[in-house]
Each structure stands twice: as structure tokens, then as C-alpha cells.
Amino acid sequence: MAKLYFYYASMNAGKSTNLLQADFNYRERGMATMLFTAGVDTRFERGTITSRIGLSEPAIAFDSGTDLGACVRERHAREPVACVLVDEAQFLTGAQVDQLARLCDTTGIPVLAYGLRTDFRGALFEGSARLLAIADSLVEIKSVCTCGRKATMNLRVDSQGRAIADGEQTDIGGNERYVALCRRHFTAALG
């Protein structure tokens, strides 16, 4: 029975690296995969999953109107797809998460979704909330705060490193915009 997996973590925990390793493992065994990433993520080349350690693979860029289930079923009709891997899964809509769950249930193709659990305010993203609600398997990828505790929060900072508490939920950035912290240091930084 195929499962819907949600691998979640704070920023800089290695989510994309883990996804690319899983993809490599399937392809090394001669199995076809499909990779998706959020089109809104402009940090790297559009339609590419890129890890901070330099690994990258082409992917299908999705937006809120993309029917991921239809994309996979169309390809699967031509060539068996062994696994679907989704990066930046927090940007999925609830309906897209439901599409991925139905894909697992009706085709037997496992889906591995990787993303943030919460935004810079500590609120759930829509895609993450739905994944937490219906995924068959929830896997936390550990990251470390500056104090050595587990980092679970994503602090948004300005160009001087000062905490930002307000703004749009989505503001794409990397180490220059976000710091992964434990809850205690996240709360202290927001004052």
C-alpha cells in the first residue's frame, strides 16, 4: 500500500538534500520518479530542486492551479512512475494535498512531500496543515538552534539581522532572510 509521507523541518535542516537522495536511490535502481517544486520559490533556477550543499535536479514547477494528480497519472500512463517527490510542500494547497493522497490510494505510487511546518510567525502553511492532517507518515527532520537545542521555528530577519514579526506569509529567502531557532530563542528574538 502506497503512503503519503510528510517530511517537515525548520529552514536549513536538509529537506531538499534528503529529497534528492531519495530520488537518487529510486533512479539508481532503474525506477522512474517525478519531482515537483513550488514555482514561487525564486532562490534558484525555476523548475529546479537545489540543496544548499550543491545538489540539484530538474523538477516540475507547480502553482496553486496545478493538478499534480493529473500530471502524474498522465506520465504514469506512458511510463511507470515509482515515486513522486515534492519539495517546498508548504506551498501546496489543501486540494493539491488531497490530490496526492488520492494518487497514493488509487495508483499505488508513494508520495514523499518535504516542507516547512510553520511560517515566520509560527503559523501553519495551508499545505503543511493539510499534510499534518492526512499524511500516512509524519517525519520530522532535525535542525539545530544556535544554543544546540532542536530548531523548530523560522525567524524572519531584515538585512541587519533584526527579527521581523509582521508581513506576508510568503517571503522567499534563504540564510539572509531566515534563521532556524528553538522556540525559546524564537520567542526571545521577537521580544
Image (cartoon, rainbow, N blue to C red):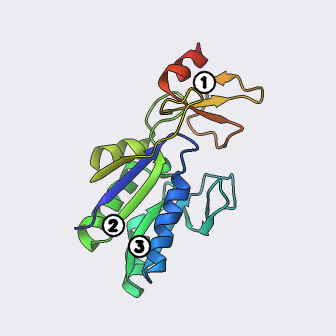
Q: Residue at x 38, y 51 (%)?
A: 6
Instruction: Report the Cα–Cα distance between label 2 and label 3.
Output: 11 Å
- Which of discs 1 and 2 lies nearer the camera? The answer is 2
User: Would you name the residue on which mark 1 appears?
Assistant: 166
The amino acid on which the numbered mark 2 sits, given as a three-letter code, is: Pro
User: Would you name the residue on which mark 3 appears?
Assistant: 72
The number of numbered badges drawn on the structure is: 3
The amino acid on which the numbered mark 1 sits, given as a three-letter code, is: Asp
**Residue 110 tag number:** 2
Residue 142: tell me if it is visible.
yes
The amino acid on which the numbered mark 3 sits, given as a three-letter code, is: Val
First in sequence, mark 2 or 3: give its number: 3
Graded by Cα atoms within 10 Å as few (under 14), some (14 to 19) or many (20 or more), the crowding at tag 2 reads many
Q: Which residue is drawn at 41% across and 79% down?
A: 74
Q: Residue at x 29, y 44 (%)?
A: 133
Q: Where is residue 169 in the image (x, y as percent from the top left)?
A: 55, 35
Q: Position of residue 119 (x, y in %)?
A: 51, 35
Residue 67: tell me if it is visible.
no
Q: Residue furthest right?
A: 160
Badge 2 element: loop
Q: Residue furthest front?
A: 148
Graded by Cα atoms within 10 Å as few (under 14), some (14 to 19) or many (20 or more), the crowding at tag 1 reads few
Instruction: Report the Cα–Cα distance between label 3 and label 1.
Output: 37 Å
User: Quarter-wise, where is residue 180 in the image?
Assistant: top right
